[in-house]
Amino acid sequence: MTQPHGYQRETLADGQVVCFRFASTGHATADQWFVDMHDLFETWDNNTPLLLLIDIHQPDNILSAQAMMRARQLAQFRPDVPGKTALLLDPGESAQNIELLIDKVLSPTRSRETFTDEAAALAWLLA
């Protein structure tokens, strides 16, 4: 598990799911995550779906403009990579705002759903 600049990267479900757990979503974190994700997409074998869990459920996490810009760039990179993305959000009001923002800003190149429960997110990814 690595923890560069405000997030941890780990694998779940016997390595089937790549998980990013964010402690912050600031400028430096967004830029480092972009590099990490870009490398992951670039080297991904298209014969295996890329299952991602993006955990931004920390109640104090507010998506920065830089994080949204980087997410938008990644959503358009390598649309040929099959897979799904589950976003784990805090169940509070900020989750509704983040969900609306994500739906409006990110292009739907891969299936994407938002969750407030990690078990439900993993079940959806693995289904």
Image (cartoon, rainbow, N blue to C red):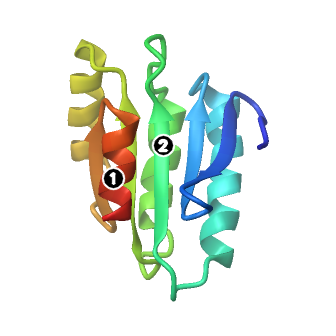
Q: CA distance from mark 1 to mark 2?
A: 14 Å
Left or right? Give the position of 76 relative to 115. right
Where 67 falls versus 44 (above or below)? above
Q: Position of residue 88 (x, y in %)?
A: 39, 35
| 1 or 2: tag closer to the N-terminus | 2
**Identity of the residue drawn at 22% across and 45% down:** 103
Where 58 falls versus 43 (above or below)? above
Total label count? Answer: 2
**Dot 2: element:** strand
Q: Position of residue 93 (x, y in %)?
A: 23, 14
**Identity of the residue drawn at 43% across and 13% down:** 59
Where 30 falls versus 84 (above or below)? above
> Residue 27 lies in what quarter of the image?
top right
**Identity of the residue drawn at 33% across and 32% down:** 117
Q: Categorize mark 2 by other alpha carbons within 10 Å: few (<14), some (14-19), many (20+).
A: some
The amino acid marked with disc number 1 is: Ala
> Residue 13 lies in what quarter of the image?
bottom right
**Identity of the residue drawn at 67% across and 47% down:** 10
Q: Quadrant of the N terminus?
A: top right
Left or right? Give the position of 33 relative to 55. right
Left or right? Give the position of 8 relative to 77. right
* Residue bearing mark 2: 54
Farthest front residue in view: 14
**Dot 1: element:** helix
Farthest bottom residue in view: 47
* Residue bearing mark 1: 123
Q: Position of residue 101 (x, y in %)?
A: 27, 35
The amino acid marked with disc number 2 is: Ile
Q: Quadrant of the C terminus?
A: bottom left
